[in-house]
């Protein structure tokens, strides 16, 4: 392959990988905080996309403008999900892990049903957006503007997340709860409050990704499924509960997927991603970067 096409594939894979990381980081954050896998993660992404679509349809707000509203909405939705569903599932006296799995999986099916009831299974899209179908050129490399903006947003979000986790009391509370849930109660930290805020933050992060996706991707009730599956791979590859491992793993997945699509038919582009994941599971079960 010549240099110019290779650079095109590399940049495309990098930007898609950054978006995968942004989608997966909320899932990794929640798992690291509570050891709970949110099987409704894809549906959170779907709700965020419909939120952006609804604000565009009802008020004419471009996703660039409505992003803060959607992210705030998702923060509240995530916190309410913990308070109304997950908190009770965690109280199970027997088979707690299975109860948590079925609770979030059942919640995912419920959210899909609600979306189909109100919006129908039809594919929707935001047309005439500010980003639209514009492209940006770097020499011989041309990048769709929505993906470029999404990559930049992902980098900014991870930078802000790093500052939140290391420079604020809330971030320190999250880290302390991740390390020892029992000990934090002795120093006056309300574990349930931290869990609710953690779920809110995780949902807000996937809300950012949903707004970005809504600018160039079709919106329908099952849209979150494929992205959720890739998110699980990213979380396992980066390290279960490793927030910043998700960033590196997302980029790896994006690049592997992009170069595989060049060598194999596009329908088989995920084969190498899953092969890489299986290799990591067998050789390094805790993931490439462990757990923060």
Image (spheres, helix red, strand yellow):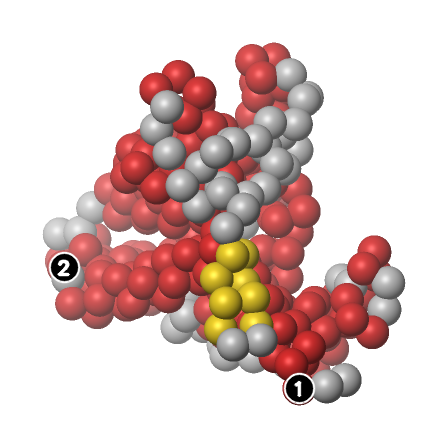
First along the sequence among labels 2 and 1: 1
Quarter of the image with the N terminus is bottom right
Compared to residue 125, the image places residue 165 above or below, namely below
**Is 99 displayed left or right of 268 in the figure?**
left
Q: Crowding near pointer 2: few (<14 within 10 Å), some, many (20+)?
A: few
For disc 1, the marked residue is 3
Compared to residue 152, the image places residue 84 above or below, namely above
Tag 1 secondary structure: helix
Q: Nearer the viewer, residue 103 or 244?
A: 244
Q: Crowding near pointer 1: few (<14 within 10 Å), some, many (20+)?
A: few
**Measuring 29% from the left and 67% from the top, which residue is drawn there?**
159
Q: Nearer the viewer, residue 95 or 280?
A: 280
Q: Position of residue 152 (x, y in %)?
A: 39, 62
Q: Position of residue 290 (x, y in %)?
A: 49, 77
Q: Position of residue 16 (x, y in %)?
A: 56, 61
Q: In the rendered image, which quarter is residue 171 located in? A: bottom left
**Measuring 34% from the left and 19% from the top, which residue is drawn there?**
59
Q: In the rendered image, which quarter is residue 281 located in? A: bottom right
Counting every numbered tag in the picture gives: 2
Between the residue at mark 2 and the residue at mark 1, the CA separation in whole angstroms equals 47 Å
Tell me the number on the disc at residue 267.
Answer: none
**Measuring 65% from the left and 72% from the top, which residue is drawn there?**
9
**Measuring 61% from the left and 68% from the top, which residue is drawn there?**
13
- The reply to whether residue 144 is visible in this rendering is yes
Q: Nearer the viewer, residue 31 or 66?
A: 66
Quarter of the image with the C terminus is bottom left
**Is 280 displayed left or right of 177 in the figure?**
right
Compared to residue 1, the image places residue 276 above or below, namely above
Compared to residue 166, the image places residue 81 above or below, namely above
Q: Position of residue 230 (x, y in %)?
A: 64, 56
For disc 2, the marked residue is 169
**Is 136 displayed left or right of 172 in the figure?**
right
């Amino acid at each position: 392959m010549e240099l110019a096409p290779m650079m095109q594939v590399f940049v495309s894979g990098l930007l898609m990988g950054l978006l995968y990381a942004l989608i997966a980081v909320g899932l990794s954050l929640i798992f690291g905080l509570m050891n709970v896998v949110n099987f409704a993660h894809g549906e959170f992404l779907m709700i965020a996309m419909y939120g952006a679509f609804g604000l565009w349809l009802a008020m004419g707000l471009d996703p660039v403008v409505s992003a803060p509203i959607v992210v705030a909405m998702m923060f509240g939705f995530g916190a309410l999900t913990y308070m109304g569903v997950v908190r009770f599932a965690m109280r199970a006296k027997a088979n707690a892990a299975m109860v948590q799995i079925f609770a979030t999986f059942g919640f995912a099916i419920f959210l899909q049903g609600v979306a189909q009831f109100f919006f129908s299974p039809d594919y929707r899209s935001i047309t005439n957006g500010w980003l639209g179908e514009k492209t940006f050129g770097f020499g011989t490399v041309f990048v769709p503007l929505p993906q470029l903006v999404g990559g930049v947003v992902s980098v900014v979000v991870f930078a802000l997340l790093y500052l939140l986790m290391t420079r604020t009391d809330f971030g320190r509370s999250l880290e302390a709860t991740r390390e020892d849930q029992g000990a934090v109660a002795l120093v006056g930290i309300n574990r349930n409050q931290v869990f609710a805020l953690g779920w809110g933050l995780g949902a807000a992060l996937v809300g950012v990704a949903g707004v970005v996706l809504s600018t160039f991707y079709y919106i329908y009730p099952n849209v979150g499924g494929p992205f959720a599956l890739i998110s699980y791979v990213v979380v396992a590859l980066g390290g279960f509960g490793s927030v910043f491992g998700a960033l590196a793993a997302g980029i790896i997945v994006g690049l592997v997927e992009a170069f595989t699509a060049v060598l194999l038919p596009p329908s088989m582009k995920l084969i190498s991603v899953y092969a890489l994941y299986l290799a990591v599971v067998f050789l390094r079960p805790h993931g490439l970067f462990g757990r923060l």
